[in-house]
Image (cartoon, rainbow, N blue to C red):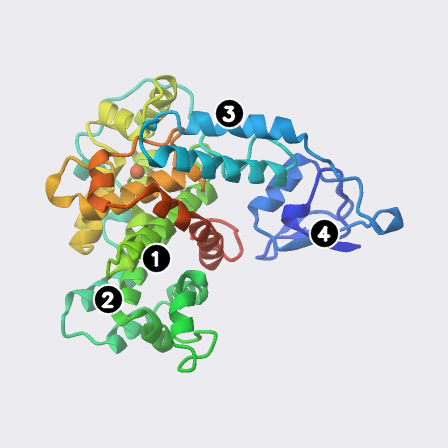
Amino acid sequence: MVRRNVSDLRAGMVLAEDVLTPGGRFLMPKGTTLDHGHVKSLLAWNLPDVGVVEGEGGSVSPVAVPDVEAVAAAAAATVAERLRLLDPGHPLTPVLHRLALDREVRRRKAVGGDASSASSGGEAARPAEDAPSPPESPEALLRDEPKLVSPPEVYLRISEVLRNPASTVDDAAESIRHDPNLAAKLLRLVNSSFYARTMRAVRGRFPAKVDSLSRAVMVVGGRQLATLALGVSVLPLFQDIPPHWVNMQVFWEHSVGCAVAAQSLAGALGRENAEAAFVAGLLHDIGRIVLFKQASTHMAAAMRQAVTAHAPLFETERALLGFDHAALGGQLLQKWQFPANLEKMVRYHHDMDEPLFVEEPAIVHLADGVATAMGWGASGNRHVAPLAPAAWDALGLTAAGVAALVPAMEARLAETMHSFFPDRAGPP
Ligand SMILES: [Fe+2]
Ligand SMILES: [Fe+2]
């Protein structure tokens, strides 16, 4: 038996041992001859490596070699379709096209040239149904979801700390300590590459691994850690989308992709609170989860219409519901009294016509565009929505500057996904 990195697995290899999920659940029996579906499934579980049967002469065989030209052509078609709504004259469009194509070719090679994968879409519209009248307003929709009436207890404690200017860093740590699950998630996050640079800067004062909330507060900052905690504490409320809508792993990969991109852009722009950008990215599409559950017939129609008309999904949501997932998400965060800047970043991430609030939502808008273009998960969109000129102008970035950030964003995405969902058994 030899151990193979999961990204090196190919159809035709034979498992030399039973494969379990990182959480210990049985996945595949010893002796399975892998096909493309098995390889995709193992990739989706983010396992580090598996044991496969060693072939004669010490090599692992057989190895399916994907047709390089066919992979390149299929990847080009996928990326062209995904980016078809972008303005070809925008300086970022060719950059996103090149980066997305490079990533799509790598992804296809990893799964033996197979066309589909968990990270390439994941949405599945339900069949047509007789449409009832649309929900009258975001408020009415939220009233009908009892779980969302109030946020979790730990959220309220953290929120109180953030609102009180006299609160100390110890108060921040104390508010989180009451929820061991949340504390563990935050420690994993702080120990991921997300804060590697900060930790390098303070090396000597802290051990390589941050093992307590007090140390995490010192590395990240009390208010920043509380801001991260605020976002992470509400994630468990959003874990039960019916699977025929969106694969939750894929949905959260999109959300974390947007979060790391927003954090990275905010850092590059010299913004003080990059954690707020991270949390806004993490929660930017939560309104869509509420819509999938509470307005499923209209969402089915909106998704069909977005596909047939080649339109951004938020536009067809507005056409059929009178509002979109961003307005709904913003309404929910306002109801829960999230900090106003976070609420605005979520509420306006598809609405750059609101002159008072362009700058911060523009970070999430661009981060969402990058995450969708790169195929980092999906939240129901088939196409990247056009980049709003007002957002691009407000940020003052260059296409080359954004391109330079993308490889680090992708590395952080993988590590942050692992820190949030270490057993990949499901959503947070
Ligand atoms: Fe969105
Ligand atoms: Fe999004």
Query: In the rendered image, which quarter contains the N terminus?
Result: bottom right
The residue wearing badge 1 is: 232
Tag 3's secondary structure?
Answer: helix
> 74 left or right of 281?
right
Callout 3: CB less than 8 Å from ligand 2: no
Q: Quadrant of residue 204?
A: bottom left
Using the image, tell me which numbered label, if any, was put on residue 77: 3
Label 3 packing within 10 angstroms: few (<14), some (14-19), many (20+) = few
Using the image, tell me which numbered label, if any, was put on residue 157: 2
Coordinates of residue 91 in the picture (x, y in percent): 33, 35
Q: Is residue 331 depicted above or below 266 in this figure?
A: above
Question: Quadrant location of ligand 1?
Answer: top left
* Lower position in the chain sequence, tag 3 or tag 1: 3
- Give me the C-alpha separation between circle 2 and circle 3: 49 Å
Coordinates of residue 260 in the picture (x, y in percent): 38, 52
Coordinates of residue 185 in the picture (x, y in percent): 42, 63
| Dot 1 amino acid type | Val
- Give me the C-alpha separation between circle 4 and circle 1: 33 Å
| Dot 3 amino acid type | Ala
Callout 2: CB less than 8 Å from ligand 1: no
The residue wearing badge 4 is: 18
Q: Which mark is in front, 3 or 1?
A: 3
Label 1 packing within 10 angstroms: few (<14), some (14-19), many (20+) = many
- Give me the C-alpha separation between circle 2 and circle 4: 44 Å
